[in-house]
Image (cartoon, rainbow, N blue to C red):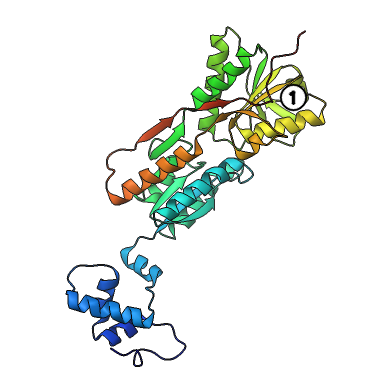
């Protein structure tokens, strides 16, 4: 078998070159490359030898086109200012790579009334790349519309839950209760709950529910939620725009629905002369990497990122291989309290 007749100098070898050198058809070479049965041992050896001589590399994209399935896992993320998505996404990418998949990231965060339409358009753009499966780290769409657009592509929600797809997430209500009970145990009674736009509504509702349960369990009336956009001097409470500073001065502690909001509150308090934790204790939710920095040292509710990523990838691969069948499976993990220096007992009055 000689390589001199295979191809012109300076040109990458093709499947036709391999077929000519091995003395077989193009379809036979394709069957060998794809590992299909029905090729004799002798013919297979001849084709493999031709591939070795030529240094031929199969066109992965072409093979995927034939199978109508790529080795891409789509990952849909929300507000990229929130390190929660980066902390979880990097773990998903590593696990996917180890299983032979590449990840394609797509931001689906829109703005206000446009969120659902924007999310739907981004999902459609991702589907044009024919991903093998999709991981949602955020969800702002209308479930029936998105589910229909996916057309049977396996889906898993990581860090959140939608009933129509597999999911793995912590118990948000348990986390909210844990955060609030920590403040109550320190002796706080005037505890606020604050949320920002970067959190999905379903998670916000569950975390607020946990806050309410803890407050009522301690015989304290829960306060209405504070909706705040970091950088603003005003917040919305029961539909009214009020001074955030006044809201914080009326409390001794605040449970923020995520770490990015809590860190923004720390910065806001510093700018307005509120000492943390002497004047105001602050608790977050997620335990992103920034929370542990010495200058921040945020008490927070830890999400087990490693476990969420591992279970999400395993679930998706199980759907792809057919080893996991049946209705959507929802895995709920336990949150954990991480105490740092942003919380302390309230000052004596």
Give the percent coordinates (x, y) of residue 239. 66, 25
Q: Quadrant of residue 129?
A: bottom left
Q: Looking at the image, can residue 233 be seen? A: no
Neighbour class for label 1 at 10 Å: few (<14), some, many (≥20)? many
Give the percent coordinates (x, y) of residue 25. 24, 82
Q: Nearer the viewer, residue 30 or 148?
A: 30
Q: Quadrant of the N terminus?
A: bottom left
Q: Quadrant of residue 252?
A: top right
Q: Quadrant of the C terminus?
A: top right
Residue 201 higher or lower than 343, as above or below: below
| Residue drawn at 32 percent across, 67 percent down | 66
Q: Is residue 59 left or right of residue 80?
A: left
| Residue drawn at 66 percent across, 33 percent down | 261
Give the percent coordinates (x, y) of residue 248. 74, 22
| Residue drawn at 54 percent across, 35 percent down | 200
The residue that disc 1 covers is: 276
Give the percent coordinates (x, y) of residue 231. 74, 37
Q: Is residue 201 left or right of residue 329?
A: right
Residue 290 higher or lower than 254, as above or below: below
Q: Is residue 268 left or right of residue 260?
A: right
Q: Nearer the viewer, residue 124 or 274?
A: 274
Query: Is disc 1 placed on a helix, strand or loop?
Result: loop
Q: How many marks?
A: 1
| Residue drawn at 69 percent across, 18 percent down | 344
Q: Nearer the viewer, residue 10 or 235?
A: 10
């Amino acid at each position: 078998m000689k390589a001199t007749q295979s191809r012109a100098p300076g040109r990458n070898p093709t499947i036709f070159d391999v077929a000519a050198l091995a003395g077989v058809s193009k379809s036979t070479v394709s069957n060998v490359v794809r590992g299909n049965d029905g090729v004799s041992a002798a013919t297979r050896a001849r084709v493999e030898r031709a591939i070795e001589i030529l240094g031929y590399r199969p066109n992965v994209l072409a093979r995927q086109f034939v199978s109508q399935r790529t080795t891409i896992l789509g990952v849909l993320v929300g507000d990229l200012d929130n390190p929660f998505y980066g902390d979880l996404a990097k773990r998903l990418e590593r696990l996917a790579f180890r299983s032979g998949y590449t990840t394609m990231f797509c931001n689906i965060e829109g703005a206000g009334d446009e969120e659902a339409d924007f999310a739907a358009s981004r999902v459609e753009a991702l589907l044009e790349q024919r991903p093998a499966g999709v991981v949602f780290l955020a969800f702002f769409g209308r479930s029936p519309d998105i589910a229909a657009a996916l057309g049977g592509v396996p889906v898993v929600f990581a860090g959140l839950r939608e009933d129509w797809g597999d999911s793995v997430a912590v118990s948000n209500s348990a986390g909210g209760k844990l955060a609030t009970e920590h403040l109550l145990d320190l002796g706080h009674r005037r505890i606020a709950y604050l949320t920002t736009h970067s959190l999905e509504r379903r998670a916000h509702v569950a975390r607020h529910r946990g806050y309410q349960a803890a407050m009522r369990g301690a015989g304290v009336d829960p306060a209405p939620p504070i909706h705040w956009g970091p950088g603003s001097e005003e917040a919305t409470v029961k539909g009214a725009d009020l001074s955030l500073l006044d809201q914080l001065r009326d409390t001794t502690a605040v449970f923020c629905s995520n770490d990015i909001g809590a860190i923004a509150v720390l910065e806001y308090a510093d700018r307005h002369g509120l000492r943390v934790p002497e004047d105001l204790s602050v608790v977050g939710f997620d335990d992103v990497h920034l929370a542990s920095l010495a200058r921040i040292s945020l008490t927070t509710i830890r999400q087990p990122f490693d476990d969420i990523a591992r279970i999400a990838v395993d679930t998706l691969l199980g759907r792809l291989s057919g080893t996991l069948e049946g209705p959507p499976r929802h895995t709920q993990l336990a949150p954990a309290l991480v105490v740092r220096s942003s919380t302390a007992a309230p000052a004596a009055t």
